[in-house]
């Protein structure tokens, strides 16, 4: 076997096809997702620390979470939600 034929065989083995799936590509995708999940876990810890800081500064964490939720919504959705809340409160005599 010639040297270049051995290289071709070696490179073919690193991208083994099993049932039409390239093992290297699949491994790469899985490892990227795993890294992102670790980053997400670290970010969740950071967010928890910020909420603890807010609580120790005297802020209500539930209200902060509601504000964050509202800021993600479209203004029309916020207005509709507030209108319905007002209607329901009046219906209950609140």
Image (spheres, grey):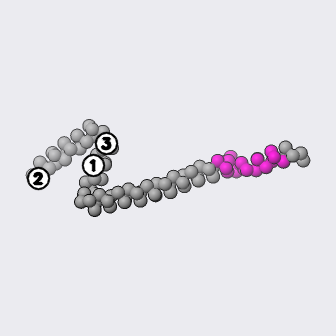
Distance Cα–Cα, label 1 vs label 2: 22 Å
Of label 2 and label 3, which has the lower sequence position? 3
How crowded pointer 3 is (Cα within 10 Å; few <14, some 14-19, many 20+) is rated as: few
- Horizontally, residue 43 falls left or right of residue 52, namely right
Residue 31 seen by the camera: yes
Q: Are marks 2 and 3 in contact (CB under 8 Å)?
A: no
Residue sitting nearer the eye, 16 or 14: 14
The extreme front residue here reads 57
Q: Which range is magenta? A: 6-25
Q: Residue 67, how many percent across, how many down?
A: 27, 49
Image coordinates for residue 23, horizontal then vertical, percent:
67, 51
Front of the two marks 3 and 1: 1
**Apparent side of residue 76 relative to residue 1 in the rendered image (left or right):** left
C-alpha span from label 3 to label 1:
10 Å
Look at mark 3 in the image and give the residue it sits on.
73
Residue at the spot 28% in from the left edge and 62% down from the top edge: 56
Q: Which element carries disc 3, helix, strand or loop?
A: loop
Q: Residue furthest right?
A: 1
Q: Which residue is mark 2?
A: 94
Task: Identify the element where label 2 is drawn.
Answer: loop
Residue 49 is one of the magenta-drawn residues:
no
* Residue at screen point 28% across, 46% down: 70
In this picture, residue 94 sits left or right of residue 67: left
Image x and y of residue 4, in percent = 84, 43
Label 1 sits on residue: 67
Label 1 neighbour load within 10 Å: few <14, some 14-19, many 20+? few
């Amino acid at each position: 076997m010639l040297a270049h034929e051995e290289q071709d065989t070696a490179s073919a083995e690193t991208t083994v096809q099993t049932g039409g799936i390239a093992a290297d590509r699949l491994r790469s995708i899985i490892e990227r997702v795993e890294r992102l999940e670790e980053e997400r876990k670290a970010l969740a810890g950071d967010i928890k620390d910020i909420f603890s800081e807010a609580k120790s500064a005297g802020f209500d964490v539930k209200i902060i979470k509601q504000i964050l939720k509202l800021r993600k919504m479209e203004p029309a959705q916020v207005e509709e939600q507030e209108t319905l809340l007002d209607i329901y409160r009046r219906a209950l005599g609140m």
